């Protein structure tokens, strides 16, 4: 069910009672207002009648006081007249404020004028001389008639008010009756509509809920099936798999992981991966950062450094390589870490065999090079001895011997260089790459000269690095040999040594060595494969191991070996770049020394 539809149904379910109550409240408010208006009209009519009756009483009091005074001429009888006179005007004002119909207001005005005329006549009689008995009776009769007229007008006014009050009271009763009936009918109608609509909405919600529950069950079944499928796949896969939570505690291990670590999944669950998966560097035997810690720190897929071994529960050491990756939820939050690793002991042995094979091939090439380089001075030495034996001139013999001594010096120099390539220890020690560059370039100068190629050596720094000088000789020998094979007569090979910063870590200073030629270059489709074992285009002379061995040796020193190449003019050629950190990762370089790899050179594919 779509969230919008679900929200809309819930909104309608809540809005219906609110709307119904609002309508009922409006209707009830309107009815109460009508009732209140009707009751207010009736109450106002009662007040008007009350004040009208009070006004009549005051007029009667005036007439009574006037009659008593005219008969007895006693001023005491004038007091009710004066009291009533002071109250009549406020009563009229009160009636004027409560009466709004124009005909009633006109009647009140006429009544007020008639009363004022009556009072004027009454006060004239009070202040005039006492009349005779016959005139007095006549005046009293006239005042009574005037008062009766006033009372008749007031009765007429009050009669109209009373009639309207009765009408409003009847209307009030009728309104109350109709309001009650209407309210009952409306409540019944609203209740019926509300019941039907609520039932319809509840039906839709029930259908949607059942459909959603079916979808949840279906997804749950699919999720369970997928989980079983993945679980069986992971447990049957050829690589070892360990899954951890975000704290680095083991949650899952397959059979291969159990075999390599020596831990059973039941025993390893909830234990820290540091305890289950202790790993060390093969060269230094120093603990390596756990991949899970690295994944937690970087939040990305990571791999192990080269030459890492795992110490199993029983103390067995297993050479491994692995990778770790974060497990994320739909929001991108890390919820776990998976570690995949494999036993590469056999691969390490194969690599060792390849290294030994490359050493034998390099030894043969070195022997051929030495034989070629020594042959020329030996031929010269033989000729000099031959001439000296047949000469009787002591001075000539001395000159020939001096020349022979020079040739012997050349042979000794070549021998020392050859021994330096092969016999130098590979124990790590500080050395100057610039010195090694000059020595290797000097060794290959004779071959370069015979090919018509010149060396341009530029050493901009005499800085030291920690590592094996013999292995750097091997690396440079491979690169220079490849450059000579790719260069034509008249070309030049430039070798530079300079200070640099590791491009992968700007906090690591070191030395950069570049070997650049302007030969025929490396095709672009081969650049991705030149560092792979046995990849070569030198079908008769190359083993395809030289660059692979060179990269392994550079990475062993914590450095990097990169290549750029073009096969089209005018910038045809290849540049190899070696970066060596001033303080390498290794504390003791043992692995290659144990396998007798020091001093190997190669003419493998560039």
Image (cartoon, grey):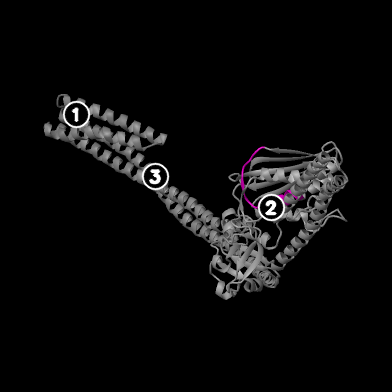
Give the residue pinned by disc 1.
135
Q: Quadrant of residue 533?
A: bottom right
Mark 3 in CB contact with mark 1 (< 8 angstroms): no
Q: Secondary structure at mark 2?
A: helix
Q: Which mark is residue 41?
A: 3
**Horizontal arrangement in the rendering, residue 149 relative to residue 81 (left or right):** right
Q: Is residue 5 visible?
A: yes
Point out the stretch of residues depicted in magenta.
Answer: 460-477
Q: Residues within 10 Å of mark 2 (few under 14, many from 20)?
A: many
x 57%, y 54%: residue: 297
* Residue 535: x %, y % from top left: 81, 56
Q: Which mark is residue 470?
A: 2
Mark 1 vs mark 2, foreground winner is: 2
Does the magenta segment cover residue 467? yes
Q: CA distance from mark 1 to mark 2?
A: 165 Å
Q: Is residue 523 visible?
A: no
Marked residue nearer the N-terminal end (3 or 1)? 3
Q: Is 164 located above or below residue 197 in the figure?
A: above
x 46%, y 56%: residue: 177
Q: CA distance from mark 2 to mark 3?
A: 121 Å
Q: Is 412 located above or below residue 247 in the figure?
A: above
Looking at the picture, tell me which residue is in the foreground, 318 or 224. 318
Marked residue nearer the N-terminal end (2 or 3)? 3
Q: Quadrant of residue 197?
A: bottom right
């Amino acid at each position: 069910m779509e969230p919008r539809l679900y929200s809309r149904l819930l909104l309608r379910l809540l809005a219906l009672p609110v709307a119904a109550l609002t309508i009922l409240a409006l209707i009830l408010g309107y009815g109460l207002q009508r009732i209140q208006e009707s009751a207010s009209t009736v109450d106002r009519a009662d007040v008007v009648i009350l004040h009208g009756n009070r006004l009549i009483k005051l007029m009667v009091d005036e007439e009574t006081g006037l009659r008593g005074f005219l008969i007895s001429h006693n001023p005491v009888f004038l007091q009710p007249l004066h009291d009533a006179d002071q109250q009549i005007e406020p009563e009229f004002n009160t009636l004027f404020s409560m009466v709004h119909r124009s005909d009633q207001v006109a009647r009140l005005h006429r009544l007020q004028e008639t009363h004022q005329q009556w009072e004027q006549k009454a006060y004239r009689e009070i202040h005039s001389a006492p009349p005779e008995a016959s005139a007095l009776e006549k005046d009293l009769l006239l005042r009574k008639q005037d008062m009766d007229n006033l009372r008749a007008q007031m009765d007429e006014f009050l009669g109209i008010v009373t009639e309207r009050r009765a009408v409003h009271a009847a209307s009030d009763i009728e309104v109350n009756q109709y309001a009650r009936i209407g309210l009952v009918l409306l409540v019944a109608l609203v209740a019926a509509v509300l019941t039907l609509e609520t039932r319809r909405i509840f039906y839709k919600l029930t259908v949607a809920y059942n459909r959603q529950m079916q979808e949840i069950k279906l997804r749950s079944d699919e999720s369970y099936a997928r989980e079983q499928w993945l679980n069986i796949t992971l447990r049957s896969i050829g690589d070892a798999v360990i899954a951890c939570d975000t704290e680095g505690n083991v949650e899952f291990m397959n059979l291969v992981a159990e075999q390599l670590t020596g831990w059973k999944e039941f025993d390893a669950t909830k234990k820290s991966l540091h305890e289950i998966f202790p790993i060390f560097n093969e060269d230094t035997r120093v603990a390596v950062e756990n991949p899970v810690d690295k994944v937690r720190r970087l939040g990305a897929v990571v791999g192990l450094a080269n030459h890492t071994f795992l110490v199993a529960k029983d103390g067995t050491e297993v050479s491994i390589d692995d990778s770790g990756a974060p497990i994320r939820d739909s929001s991108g939050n890390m919820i776990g870490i998976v570690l995949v690793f494999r036993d590469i002991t056999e691969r390490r042995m194969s690599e060792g065999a390849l290294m030994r094979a490359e050493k034998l091939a390099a030894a043969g090439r070195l022997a051929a090079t030495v034989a070629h380089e020594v042959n020329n001075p030996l031929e010269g030495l033989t000729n000099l001895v031959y001439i000296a034996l047949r000469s009787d001139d002591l001075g000539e013999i001395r000159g020939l011997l001096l020349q022979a001594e020079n040739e012997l010096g050349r042979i000794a120099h070549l021998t020392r260089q050859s021994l330096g390539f092969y016999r130098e220890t590979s124990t790590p020690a500080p050395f100057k790459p610039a010195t090694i560059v000059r020595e290797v370039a000097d060794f290959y100068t004779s071959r370069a000269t015979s090919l018509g190629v010149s060396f341009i050596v530029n050493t901009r720094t005499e800085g030291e690095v920690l590592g094996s000088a013999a292995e750097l000789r091997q690396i440079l020998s491979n690169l220079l040999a490849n450059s000579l094979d790719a260069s034509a007569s008249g070309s030049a090979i430039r070798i530079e040594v300079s200070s640099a910063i590791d491009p992968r870590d700007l906090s690591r200073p070191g030395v950069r060595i570049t070997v650049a030629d302007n030969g025929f270059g490396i095709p672009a489709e081969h650049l991705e494969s030149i560092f792979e074992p046995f990849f070569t285009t030198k079908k008769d002379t190359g083993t395809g191991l030289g660059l692979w061995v060179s990269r392994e040796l550079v990475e062993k020193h914590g450095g990097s070996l990169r290549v750029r190449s073009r096969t089209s003019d005018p910038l045809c050629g290849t540049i190899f770049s070696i970066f060596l950190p001033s303080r390498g990762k290794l504390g003791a370089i043992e692995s290659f020394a144990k396998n007798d790899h020091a001093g190997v050179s190669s003419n493998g594919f560039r």
